[in-house]
Amino acid sequence: MNVRDFSRILLTSGVALGALASPALAQTAPGSSSGMAAADEGGSTAIIVTGSRIKQDPTKSALPLTVISNAEIQQNGISSPEQLIMYLSTNGTGADNLAANADVTTGAQRGTNGLSAANLRGQGSAATLVLLNGRRVAAHGLSGSAVDVNQIPFAAIDRVEVLKDGASAIYGTDAIGGVINYITKKDYTGLGVSGFADLTEAGGGNIYNVSGIAGYGDLKEQGFNIMAAVSYRWNKMLRGSQRDFVNGNQPNRGLSVDTRGTPLATAFNIGANAFQQPGGTLLQGLTLTAPNGANAAAGGINPLNLPGGAGCETMDGGMAYDYALWNAATAYYACAWDTGRAAVIQQPIETLTYFARGVVALGASELSVELTGSDANSAKSFSNAQLSANTTNLPIGMPLNSLTKSTYDSVFNSIRGAFAGNAAQVAALDARYGRPIGFRWRCAPCGPREYVTDTKTFRVAAGIDGPLPLAGWDYRVGASYARSESSSVLGSGYYYRGTLANGASDPNAPTAPGATAPGLVGVINSGLINPFSLTQTEAGLAALEAVSAKGATLYGGRYQLKQVDASFSGPLFALPGGDVQMAVGVDYRRETYEFNGSPAAAATAPVIFLAAFDNVNALTPKNRDVKAAYAEINVPVFDMLELTGAVRIDDYSGFGTTTNPKVSAKFQPAEWVMFRGSYSTGFRVPSFNQIFNGITESPYSGSDLADPVKCPGGVPNATNPACAFIRPNIWTGGTIDLGPETAKMASLGVVLRPAPRWTASVDWWSIRADNTIQLLTLRQLIDNAALFPDRFIRDGSGTITTIDQRWINAGARKTQGLEISLRGGFDLPGNSQLNLGADGTMLLEKKEKLTPTSAWSASQIGVFTFAGDLGLRWKHNAWLTWSNDNLSATFSQIFRKGYKNQALPGIAAGTITRPDYNPMVKDYAIYNLTVSYQGLIEGLKLTAGVKNVFDTDPPFAITYDGNTGAGSSWEPRVADPRGRSFILQAEMKF
């Protein structure tokens, strides 16, 4: 698109909007809704508010805009952008926070290390536009799509504006769920320092923040201002083992863990490997009949769970394997281990943010330059590696030698004694004495697995704005460059495997002292490490250290954004209701994304066990150009009726041109009542990863899938051979011909103001997305197998070998809801005030269809799913604030409605029941109290408070995923795991 095309589009847009004539896209008061305390309505000065390019009185514009001041953020003990986003009732319930993506992840959650994202109206993080001072910031360097809100310079924030409405016609086609605009202080003078601590009563997970801000120069008096702010924030680690509600061993409630890799190993019947174990293993080919009639040798035998054994529970986190719940009868004598207690439930992260801004008056215009950046270091830590012996690449077993004989004989004799009543089976076992014991083992001495991710962002923006010679007209011109660069390296818990794909020794892997072969396999097969013991020798620990892969690069990515924009706004002519206002503008941006693989995953490098290398997804820099022109017109038809129209034309390289209009209206027949409504469209293109990623093939490890053709419903059932569980390979990755999704957004609302300090609003909203860009869950594919037969790859006998779970344009999604806001206040004796308020969001509809011609699904409101948005029926925040000149106190409630619980295979198939299984997860409600005081020393403000006053645990929920081993007994998308905590903050201004 050349300059001539832009000129033609701009002229056409202006003419079209003159005919459309409808309202501004944002508003503060009468429909203002701050997520915490009542927002300051401010004066009547016309300013640019989020969602419009036309200056207007923010108290009288058309659509709800949540305005959250810096004072409110502090008053509620919020110390980071992530905490603020999670507070908003209009934000979705997806895996977008540092607790929800802290464990082992697959699919769309890959590459979210250290990422916190916004997800307005549950439309996904890629459909929420995040701005800083009205301009875009770079997407996260690993994900390449969502913006990491923790890069925002919180110490410099003046207010946050949340537009709960589509804004594709103003900011770009991807603003479907809404817009969050972080607005910094603009004319700060003086010096301010602040310190913050949020300390948990139960220990672990503390949060700290220190910040400073300085500014000099009065823009009005001296013609310039310079300011700078810096903040350092660190969240301490919180592990599942530090909270009692994290407990995967609750069989009466229908929850137990599907892993037989435990800190004291479980013996298995592993076959021979020509390189490492040519004679096979102890239980190879054996039949050892358990009391339930199944072959225990095939399902694993743990000495702790045998008759006379100490019991699986004697291991920390151990439990008897619940073979009935998982439809795995052969695991009668196996133990399991609670992986959730080993995982991190609050990621440790340290974040440095900085911001600098300079502005100078050039006559009536202002020239500004701002620079911001961040450096975040996170440590994503999850359960210790499970070593599952196999006959190909991990042929491990405990040998019989001088180092191991005592333990070997103990394990052998305990197994022999359990089956002493069957002479033939005992004889077969005796004949194999001396062979290595194959096993599954949770490598406790290896330490928890950890990814250490460093993400650096940098952004520089320059702009000039001011009046034009034409009366009442203004201009705004700017340019910016932003980048986010991330790199993840391996921390603890990762080791060079020591074998190639066929089990032969890896010549590039290191060999530990005393080992007879390279890598981890060599250490184990030499007997240096004892998997059937909870303690290890110094020599064994030294051998592990010698084959550690700590520090190896996992992957890295970089996202860059270059943007220039210009807009012009002013009056056209007068109508009875006031001047008709118009804005026109152009916008150009170039997005560049690259993803680096790891040298450690190269063909000539030694293999690292379980490292999730993404070399198949490595991308050389990919570019996308977006050229746009837009126009907006505000028509005050008469005093009671105001219309606004906007239209934007975008040209995407690779996807062509799209035109997206927006119309809205405000009708205010009386001072105390206002009606409003809007309609708009959107157009969201796929991210670079969704298009260009390669195919990653991973074996499925869960026990909850069956062939949907042979077994309608695809739920395993041990009593039906056709419903035996399957463990195919899973393909994930990009789809080169993936297309854009389109959306239609509409809203209708009413705002009541019966008295000057009392307002109430209700807004109905609807979003319909077509050709949706989705990563269908495995359960969705199984349940809808007839719609996607090509996604199930079968061998010649008809057995499913692979399920293709790559990105797809699938059908449509529709979501409807109500957003409700209430504000009120009283004057009290003693020059004090009492203010109250609430914000709530109710989902009315959430459905999808997976192809254009298929039927709509049943309601997805409040239905558990491993990925995506949970879709709670109701969420609200309510508060009560008392204040006088020096003292204020706020008491607030956060409420999240319950939802349908997950059912593990035995219960889902109806083969068993459990007495305490709860099909519905309970509601979650916590209360917070903060008190602030200023007046002790001039410029000093002190805040203290209690979060989660009644120390409410997250409600019990079955979130365990048998495939990844992630999840546990609570839902991080809904609840805060930290428990009761105490906040202290001191802020001093000079």
Image (cartoon, rainbow, N blue to C red):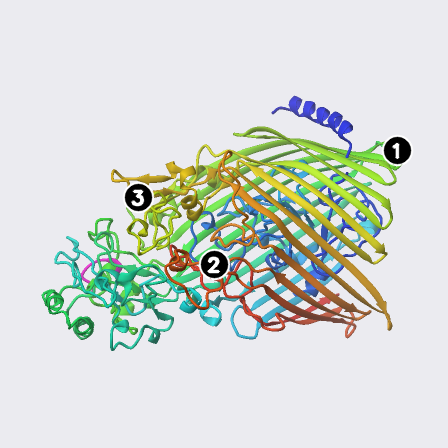
Q: Is residue 429 left or right of residue 501?
A: left
| Residue 875, visible in the rendered structure | yes
Q: Which residue is mark 1?
A: 575
Nearer to us in this view, 99 or 675 = 675
Q: Which residue is mark 2?
A: 102
State which region is magenta. 515-520
Residue at position x 32%, y 63% in the image: 323
Give the x, y percent position of residue 696.
37, 44
| Amino acid type, residue under disc 2 in the picture | Ala
Task: Give the mark nearest the N terminus, 3 or 2.
Answer: 2
Task: Give the mark nearest the N terminus, 2 or 1.
Answer: 2
Give the x, y percent position of residue 247.
44, 68
Give the x, y percent position of residue 521.
24, 59
Under circle 3, the secondary element is strand
| Amino acid type, residue under disc 1 in the picture | Leu
Q: Is residue 323 left or right of residue 59?
A: left
- The quadrant of the rendering that contains the N terminus is top right
Nearer to us in this view, 221 or 853 = 853
| Amino acid type, residue under disc 3 in the picture | Thr
Residue at position x 14%, y 64% in the image: 435
Q: Report if the CB atoms under discs 3 and 2 are less than 8 Å apart.
A: no
Mark 2 and mark 1: Cα distance apart in space:
57 Å
Q: For residue 311, what is the image quadrant?
A: bottom left
Nearer to us in this view, 429 or 153 = 429
Q: Which residue is mark 3?
A: 801
